[in-house]
Image (cartoon, rainbow, N blue to C red):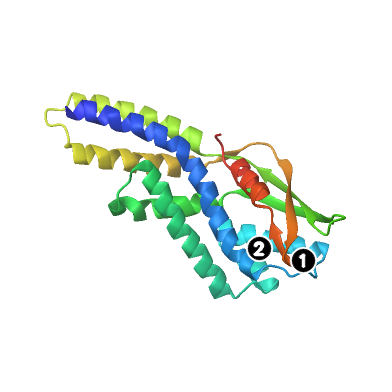
Amino acid sequence: MSGYAFWLLCVLETKMENTRIKKSVNKMMLLLIGVLVVGAVSGCASDKSVRTYLQALLDTSYKNNSDAFVEIKLGTQEDAQALYEQGIDTGVGVFCSRLGVSDAYKEEFRQVYMDMLGKVRYTVEEAEKQSDGSYNVTVTYEKMNIFDPALAMHEENVAAMMEEWASAAEPPSEEEMVAATYREFKNCMETVLAGVQYDEAATMTVRIELVDNVYTPNANDIEELEKALFDGE
């Protein structure tokens, strides 16, 4: 296979994998929230404590902000940091595996992954107690447009690189081309994140249910919220 043909194949594979990255981001947040539920709010709760509880889950997962986590005694600041790092380690691993990125490039994507999560926009609003003892918590959010514009930019830049390499007297090796495509995708994400755009604010409800005397966020609602925070299907 020629270097040009190999590169074209890589581009097509990358395009398909990028559509799966958005799903992997959602799954990683669910893993972290599952850990946090172990120290969740007990059966005695109030509107404020439930609202603060959901705030703690989201802030620790996305923002690396342990204020609410410590306030309602889910754990110490060190506990929250450890959970955040665990979530990032797992998330970056899945993020890179979906791209087919080897471990050698994993650390290069770590910071852009953290920056992406840190820029999500949400506001935890009021919590309303229901007749069955559960709570409906309103969350206002703004969808981040990151993957679609980064992918469009990446494809355009890759096309220019392909033309340059095809006419080069000594084109780069296949290994060098593969490395270049991953680094270019990282650069595109950084560029889009620097001026990232958001959709208009919308709202959704997250149910906080009493399970074995422990208030627990409904997994389906959390998954839907996470899907709503990023562009793409």
Residue holding disc 1:
49
What secondary structure is marked by label 2? helix
**Residue 69 location in percent, x, y?**
64, 68
Name of the residue lying farthest toward the right: 131
Q: Residue at x 25, y 31 (%)?
A: 7
* Marker disc for residue 97: none
The C terminus is located in which quarter?
top right
Q: Residues within 10 Å of mark 2 (few under 14, many from 20)?
A: many
Q: Which of marks 1 and 2 precedes in the sequence?
A: 1
**Residue 82 location in percent, x, y?**
50, 69
Q: Residue at x 39, y 51 (%)?
A: 109
Q: Is residue 25 visible?
A: yes
Q: How many marks?
A: 2
Question: What whole-number distance in Å separates the C-alpha atoms at marks 2 and 1?
Answer: 10 Å
**Residue 60 location in percent, x, y?**
59, 62
Name of the residue lying farthest toward the left: 169
What's under tag 1, amino acid-wise?
A: Ser
Quadrant of residue 44 in the image? bottom right
Q: Is residue 161 visible?
A: no
Residue holding disc 2:
56
Q: Residue at x 41, y 37 (%)?
A: 17
The N terminus is located in which quarter?
top left
